[in-house]
Amino acid sequence: MPYMLLIHERVGQREIRGRVEGEAVYGRMLRFAAELRSRGVLRAVESLASQDGAVRVSVSGGRAQVLDGPFAEAKEMIGGFFLVDVPTRDEAVAIARECPAAEWATVEVRAVGPCYT
């Protein structure tokens, strides 16, 4: 069963960390992804860029509205994700516990499924 592991990190954390430490942390995440890939459980993984250049799109009454960031003051942003395929939620949680990002962020584990349930 597929599970999404969403990395919730504090806004501004990357700037405080700096480039050298940031590259070291990113290297740890790349090694973690490679290890999951070697175990055959990784479907996809991506790191997300800063939310500074993000836009939000909504449609109301047939009219699209595009809002440029930055958005309302937020304490967290989605910094990236792992999409894993494991038999049980417990196994997905165990992977989240192994994730290096759990040391500086929160890793949310959610089953992947249709939005009508």
Image: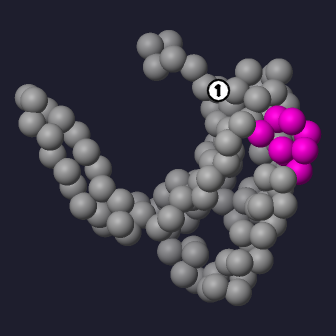
Q: Point out the stretch of residues depicted in magenta.
A: 35-42
Q: Quadrant of the N terminus?
A: top right
35 relative position to 21: left or right = right
Label 1: few (<14), some or many (≥20) within 10 Å? some
Whether residue 74 is visible, yes or no, is yes
Q: Quadrant of residue 30?
A: bottom right
Q: Pinpoint residue 22: horizontal percent, then vertical percent.
A: 68, 78
Q: Residue at x 25, y 45 (%)?
A: 57
The three-letter amino acid code for the residue at tag 1 is Ala
Which residue is more in the foreground, 72 or 37? Answer: 37
Q: Pinpoint residue 47: horizontal percent, then vertical percent.
A: 60, 58
48 relative position to 111: left or right = left
Q: Pinpoint residue 34: horizontal percent, then vertical percent.
A: 84, 53
Q: Residue at x 70, y 87 (%)?
A: 20
Label 1 belongs to which residue? 111
Whether residue 72 is visible, yes or no, is no
Which residue is more in the foreground, 56 or 71? Answer: 56
18 relative position to 72: left or right = right
39 relative position to 105: left or right = right
- Number of numbered markers: 1
Q: Pinpoint residue 97: horizontal percent, then vertical percent.
A: 82, 47
Q: Residue at x 66, y 60 (%)?
A: 105
Magenta: main secondary structure equals helix
Q: Is residue 40 magenta?
A: yes
Q: Residue at x 74, y 56 (%)?
A: 102
Residue sitting farthest toward the top: 117
